[in-house]
Amino acid sequence: MPENADRALKNFLCYLPATVDEWLIFYDSRFTKEIARRVAEAIRVREVVDLRQTRAEHVSTLDETCFPFPQIGALFFSLFHAAGSYSNEYLNAFERLNVFDTWPSNRCRIVDEVTDSTFDDVFQTSPDSLRDDCFETLDRCRQSDRARFSADTGSLDIRYDPKSGVPYTGFEPYEFNIPSGEIAFNPIDINGRISFCGWLIGSIPFGQKYGRIGDDQLILTFDNGRISGVSGSRGGLVSDLEATFGRSPALRDVKEFGIGLNTAASALARRHTVGLQWMEKCRGLHLGLGAELTEHISDHRLRRTHHHLDLVFDRGELLVGDNLILSCS
């Protein structure tokens, strides 16, 4: 196995909890067949399930028979918005994966939209160094409650609750999504105007439809923590975003001030035109719209919307107080 592939697999295995002795692996053979094979050879496996070759009833049976045993975990190589056509059986089997929502986070891992062709690149960062970077940056950001993000296309003034900071290192008890590597705060207020450059990703597939967003294509105005104005040269994107805000006004609200710290994700993202879920881990600023993070709200029923969209900026400079936190170009 090439050195970078060997390193990626070793790094990935670090994120699997030691309390799980045996795994169910769910994958899509069109996109993640090689990943599933390599991982299955490295860990103890109860069953490997190709969603293209199984029935929904079998997925439910695995949940029912394995849930009572805390040493069994479930590993999902997920492609929520992957392009392509699907049979009804595939869609039904994929839908039945929702039954695993009742499993505790220390028995589940979801690998967000990482494919056979991207696995080795996105898991190049050392898990230990990434964890250290997360906690170091978290401590620095807790020294203030104000940040300023500046780029050549505009700037944003951000006020946030420093006590609300949450690390996503890949090892925290509440985590189940990998790759990891970010910290997040509850924003109190955001103001400014900026031409957004980067990726718009989340539970509505803007990332797949519009890919990387460039200069002057999407200009956003923020007032009192909300997006108050949308314009830009990419008419279809502007129209779609305005229509989405019209159907779900709560998506205008900024509910996450996030800082991605995964340098491997950043290097990989710059070679991609499609926006994918793991890109919020890219080194830089991202702002989450709509649904609050689970760690920032006591009751999910209080959410005004369950959709969450991330504005992942691919360039800019972030200062917290008078300290430079990161600079990306």
Image (cartoon, rainbow, N blue to C red):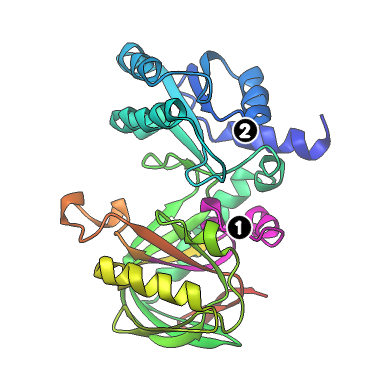
Magenta stretch holds residue 125: no
Q: Amino acid at mark 2?
A: Thr
- Residue ID for mark 1: 274
Label located before the other in sequence (2 or 1): 2
Front residue of this view, candidates 22 and 245: 245
Question: How many C-alpha atoms fall within 10 Å of the one at disc 2: few (<14), some, or many (≥20)?
Answer: many
Q: Amino acid at mark 1?
A: Val
Depicted 128 relative to depicted 75: above or below: below
Relative placement, left or right, of 134 versus 257 is: right
Q: In x, y percent, where is residue 147?
A: 44, 80
In magenta, the rendered stretch is 261-288
Residue at left offset 56%, top offset 14% = 44
Relative placement, left or right, of 158 versus 316 is: left
Q: CA distance from mark 2 to mark 1?
A: 17 Å
Q: Is residue 159 visible?
A: yes
The disc at residue 32 is 2
Instruction: Find numbered disc 2 in the image and state the secondary structure of the residue it sits on.
Output: loop
Front residue of this view, candidates 152 and 58: 58
